[in-house]
Amino acid sequence: MSIHHPDRPTLSYEFFPPKDDSGDALLWSSFDALLKTSPDFVSVTYGAGGTNQARSISVVERMAQNVATVGHLTAVGATRAKTLDLLRDFEATGVAGILALRGDSPKDNPDALAQGEIKTALELVELSEANTGLDIGVAAFPEIHPESPDLAHDIRVLKFKQDAGATFAITQLFFDLDAYARFVSAAHEAGVTIPIIPGLMPISNAKQVLRMAELSGASIPPRLLNDLQSAQDDQSARRVGMAFSVEFGRRLLAEAAAPGLHIFSLNSHVAALELATGVGLA
């Protein structure tokens, strides 16, 4: 899979494995709707430490029949043998690539990462590169990883991953254009050449997105926060949030020369489609 098109920005979506039958129906109706926009690829998240992993693998392999699909993979509780089996299964069933993530231990097993044989995303990159032909994506953090001492450290880690075989990066949730531009500039200066695709969250449910931003450590622009808090009702807040999301996506593409946008769909096609259309990628 080649997710980088020098002549045009890419469009992609993230989905997550459903927890029940109603969630399953929502996922596939949204997937079918977004597939009509001809995305370059889609990705599917992966539950840590056994959470929803079987569903995730099933979703990845089913989506791969219709579009280039990237399966998220974490190091939490992972052994080399089982991870290698999964990588080879992905390759055999037509999965295009993986997103190699360290991941965090689940709350009910805080020692899961320490207990696993694989400890880092870099080890996942190395294992996949040595044993498969899968494309390998990694995470990037425009506002610095929560456990990182500084931006320079994050850039060094990203360069290590590129040197080990990573072919693209997708960023964590963020809302600061300058943070992305600084990160990409620093990465390029350090010799990082792989595309760094912004992960973009459509703000259709302000409370939900603000909560996710708080959990991930993403800063909210003061003006946006004020406008959302001043909205008279949920619909007004949605209009404010989506207007910001579309403008932010346009600026990432035009001003920051982003190689594409990876839209976090939250398994709902309405806002994702509105955003993709609004920025001119669908």
Image (cartoon, rainbow, N blue to C red):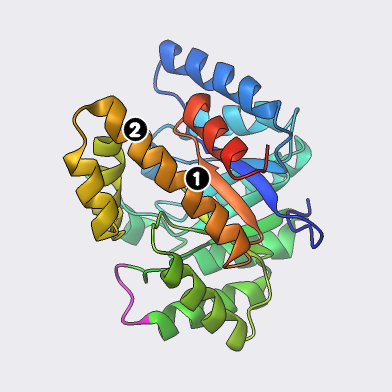
User: x, y percentage for residue 278?
Assistant: 57, 39
Amino acid of disc 1: Val
Q: In the picture provided, is 121 more to the left or to the right than 2?
A: left
What amino acid is found at the position of numbered circle 2 in the picture? Arg
**Which residue is located at x 47 percent, y 53 percent?**
248
Q: Position of residue 274 (x, y in %)?
A: 53, 32
Left or right for 40, reference 24:
right
For residue 116, which quarter of the picture? bottom left
Q: Which residue matches tag 2?
A: 238
Q: Position of residue 1 (x, y in %)?
A: 78, 50
Can you give x and y, in whole percent of width and height, for residue 61 in the image? 66, 31
Q: Residue at x 68, y 69 (%)?
A: 165
Which residue is at 43% across, 18% downward? 23
Instruction: Return the disc, 1 or 2, that comes first in the chain's sequence.
Output: 2
Which contiguous range is marked in magenta? Answer: 146-150
| Residue holding disc 1 | 246
Query: Quick one: SS at disc 1?
Result: helix
Residue 201 visible in the displayed image:
no
- Which quadrant of the rendered structure holds the C terminus? top right
**Dot 2, how many residues are within 10 Å of its Cα: few (below 14), some (14-19), or many (20+)?**
many
Q: Main secondary structure of the magenta part?
A: loop
User: How much space separates mark 1 and mark 2, taking CA atoms?
Assistant: 12 Å
